[in-house]
Image (cartoon, rainbow, N blue to C red):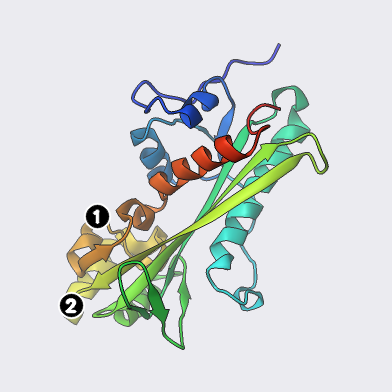
Amino acid sequence: MSPTHNAVLPNALKTVAVQKLVGKRIVLASASPRRKDILQNLGLAPEIIPSTFEENLPVSSFEDIHEYPVATATHKAVEVYERLVSENPDDAPDLVIGADTVVLTHALPATSTEMELGTTQELLEKPSSKEDNLRMLLDLNGGVCEVVTGVSLVYPILSAPGYDIKSLDERTLVYFADNPLEVLQAYVNSGEGLDRAGGFAVQGLGNLLIRKVDGDFSNVVGFPGASFFKLLDVLVEEEVDFLAV
């Protein structure tokens, strides 16, 4: 007998898409407490099963750098989906959510909905040390960076290979103040930025370094909740078999 699942919390909005999630096995392929908290605040409490994907895709292989976090999110979600199906086919997940957040340096804003990117744009993930963290912050200081989160959803279908994938990328501009070196060093010494893409936490002490955010604040924290639920709405409307297999 398959176990009972229900990731939908009482505070969730009773939309058609959310109602489709009731009684389903929903899995988040990430150990990030920020992503877990964002989803719970929006009414969803998925199982937390981190992916074992090494996140070692070569950045140079992507013509559009925005495809990099989407590809990483897809590999994470597929790895978890295939592992869980292999471990227990009778309790396969109905939806696996993969996500990856990166910071792109030197974004030059045109408007709030359009962005021109500079010719040299570095992709920043988590710093490898305090020295690397300071290097990142010095590069970001007084400028504008772009935070990009790729989100991929994997769910079962009847045709080969047995699952389908739908993805999105969310982009947010973060404007850094022109901070003195002693402030950047103090932030690095706090240790907060060491496990954050780009070396800063916008929802923590890192907020002191930032002048403004243009776009989805939650995306900078690590997960674009609004866009995720909008994608669910689209899938329910356009995919007849979505969450029905």
Q: Position of residue 88 (x, y in %)?
A: 74, 27
Pointer 2 with pointer 1, Cβ within 8 A: no
Q: Amino acid at mark 2?
A: Asn
Q: Position of residue 110 (x, y in %)?
A: 32, 78
Q: Amino acid at mark 1?
A: Gly
Instruction: Report the side of 13 relative to 183 (left or right).
Output: right
For image coordinates 16% across by 80% down, the residue present is 180
The residue lying toward the viewer, choosing from 19 and 31, is 19
- In the picture of the structure, the residue carrying the numbered disc 1 is 204
Residue 179 is labelled as: 2
Q: Is residue 10 above or below residue 127?
A: above
Q: Secondary structure at mark 1?
A: loop
Instruction: Report the side of 27 relative to 226 (left or right).
Output: right
How busy is the neighbourhood of tag 1: few (under 14 within 10 Å), some, or many (20 plus)?
A: few
Cα separation between marks 2 and 1: 16 Å
For image coordinates 43% across by 31% down, the residue present is 44
The residue lying toward the viewer, choosing from 103 and 241, is 241
Q: Quadrant of residue 225?
A: top left
